[in-house]
Amino acid sequence: MASPVFARTMFGCAGNPLIVALGVLLLVGCTEEPPELPEHAYTTFGDQWRCERGFKRVEDECQSVEVPEHAFLSYNGDDWTCERGFRRIEDDCQPVEVPKNAYLDYAGHRWACDRGFKRAEDECQPIEVSEEASPDLPEHAFVSYGDKWKCDRGFQRVTDRCEEIQVPEHTFLNDTGKDWKCERGYKRVKEQCQRIQVPEHAFLSTSGDAWVCDRGFKREGNRCSPQ
C-alpha cells in the first residue's frame, strides 16, 4: 500500500488529507489555489503565466510595450518592429538612407546595390568589367551567360526589349525585382493593393496581409467574437 507521503507527492496535493480505505487511495479536497496573477496577465498551464498582447514580462509584472513612431507590435505582442524603410536604433525607428544605385532589401530594414554596382562603405560604386564581345543589348538589360541577357531590376522582358514594371500605389518591388508586393497593412487584389480593415480585438499577422483575433476571441466572418 502506498504511503500517504507518496500519494500526496504523486497527486501534487501536499498538505491535503488522504483517506486510505480497503487499499484504495481516496483524495479529499485536492484543490490548489490558482496562482496570483499580475495585472494584464493570464495563465498558460500549471502555475505559469504570460502577459497579454501589448505587454512584456519584467520580473513579476507586466509592463506596457512602448511602440515608437514608424513601428508596430511584433507577432508575439511583447516587442516591436520597425516599418519598412526604417531600422531599429536603440528605442527608435530611423529612416534607412538608401544611396544612389541601391534599393531596400526584402525585409526593408537594409539596402543592397543594384546589379553592376558594389557596396563601398555607404555608397554603391560601379563594378569595373573587362571589354568582351557581347550581344546587342536592349536598354535596361545585362548579359547573363553566353549570348543570353536579362532585364535589370524593375524591368521585365517583352520579346526583344525590357519594359518597366508598373508598380501601383502602396507596393514595392520584391527581392527578384520582377514583381511587386503590397506594403504591410494591404493585400493584393488583382493588380492593386487594398487596405486591410482590421476589426476590433484583432491585429495584423506577421505577413502583414491578413489579420488575427486577439487571445480569447475567435473569427466569425469579418469580426472577432468572444470564445
Image (spheres, rainbow, N blue to C red):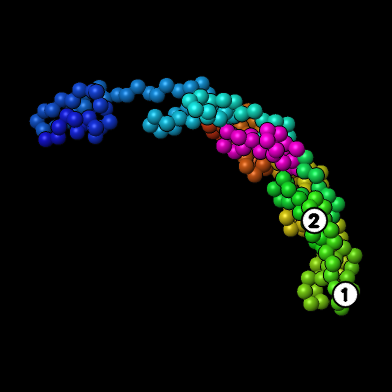
Bounds of the magenta span?
Answer: 73-94
Q: Which residue is drawn at 87% across and 75% down?
A: 131
Is the residue 194 above or below the residue 46 in the image? below
- Residue 86 position, x and y percent, is 74, 40
In depth, the one of 194 and 110 nearer the eye is: 110
Cα gap from disc 2 to disc 1, whole angstroms = 23 Å
Is the residue 185 above or below the residue 104 in the image? above
- Res 124 visible: yes
Say if the magenta span includes residue 83: yes
Q: Is residue 76 left or right of residue 72?
A: left
Task: From the image, tell me which residue sits under label 1.
Answer: 131
Which of the two marks, 2 or 1, is nearer to us in this view? Answer: 2
Q: Residue furthest left?
A: 22
Tell me the quarter of the picture where residue 3 sits: top left
Is the residue 212 above or below the residue 143 in the image? above
Q: In this view, does 218 lie to the left or right of 114?
A: left
Tell which circle, 2 or 1, labels the residue nearer the N-terminal end. Answer: 2
Task: From the image, tell me which residue sits under label 2.
Answer: 120
Is the residue 64 above or below the residue 196 in the image? above
